[in-house]
Amino acid sequence: MHIPDAFIPLPQAAVYWIIALVFLGLAVRWARSELNEDKIPLIAVLAAGIFALQSFNLPVSMGTSGHLVGGALAAIVLGSPFAAVFILTLVLIIQGFIFGDGGITVMGANILNMGVIGGFVGYYSFQGLLKVVKNPYISSAFAAWLACLIPALACAIEMAIAGTFPLVPGLVAMGIYHAIIGVIEGIVTAVIIYVLAMARPDLVDTSVGVTSA
Amino acid sequence: MIDNKTFLIGGVLLALVIGIVAVFLASGDPDGLESTALVVSGQKDLTGLSPEDGDPEVIGTGSFAYESPMPDYSLGEELGSTGNMIAIVVGTLLTLLVVLGASYIIRMSKQGQY
């Protein structure tokens, strides 16, 4: 759901940039207090992995493909939605400037959707689900599914405000496609959290509940 | 348990393998946003296949244009999938370096405070 430059007029794109910069500032504050010798390798590996996985488009039928976004993954593993903002912003900067994937003027909107909304939806729905379901993998899979679907709906609303998509057809199509793409998001997120919990349970945030005894 | 250095190197190697495999196996179909653009511009049915020559950006109204050095993770037609692989490797390693760099700068600025 990387929005290209053509899809949002400049004044609106500027508004999304301002919102994104507020959250980016808070993400830097998070990074200042949380980054240490153990967390830096984890953040670096997650970012490199998210970049690679975002290039892996899987077919989801209906002439459409999708890939992991990674906002829920980053937020759950690092225990903060601001981790998602931090990592997704840096990934989006590289994708936009080097590969033309996602626009430059609209980068604020992409940070808002995939980093901020994806990170917050992923993190808080995971925390809520974990209390009920008690299983971190099922909870993270469903949280990640929501963290794909909700940003896509937000994107459809932004497209309607921009005059690029009509509201209802945009919401319907974005919703249907990302409800399926979200299954990829859910499965891949749960698998990666499982692998991390096997390799280095101490690095996974204690709220996930996989820390080794 | 593996140490931080092994974790970092192993994780990045795994990312590189995923990225290179993606060059050959990833679907070329438009993503959810592009498909929606094709639907609302009348180039595609909601549940139908996407047209080979569809242009999702036809409904765009923006005027800003930016030429990236490796558009669409490609180094041009001649280099083909070799170019795609180079682009993915460069992007993955660049992501790693930028995140490591940003993290160390943020950590140094914190230490400078005290």
Image (spheres, coloured by chain):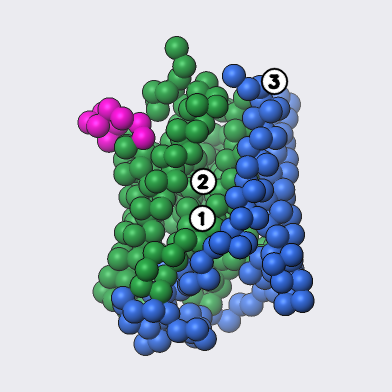
Cα–Cα gap, marks 3 and 1: 32 Å
Cα–Cα gap, marks 3 and 2: 26 Å
The chain letter under disc 2 is A
Spot occupied by residue B73 in the image (x, y as percentages of width and height):
66, 65
Q: Amino acid at mark 3?
A: Tyr
Residue B29 visible within the image: yes
What quarter of the picture does the C terminus of chain A occupy? Answer: top left
Horizontal placement of A107 versus A165: left or right? right
Q: Amino acid at mark 2?
A: Val
The hue used for chain A is: green
Q: Amino acid at mark 1?
A: Ile
Spot occupied by residue B58 in the image (x, y as percentages of width and height):
49, 85
Look at the image and give the residue range highlighted in magenta. A128-137
Residue under pointer 2: A85
Q: Nearer the viewer, mark 3 or mark 2?
A: 2
Residue under pointer 3: B114
Dots 3, 1 in contact, CB < 8 A:
no
Q: Is residue B106 above or below residue A25?
A: above
Spot occupied by residue B24 in the image (x, y as percentages of width and height):
61, 63
Residue most toward the left? A132
Residue under pointer 1: A111
Q: Secondary structure at mark 2?
A: helix
- Locate residue B50: give its quadrant: bottom left
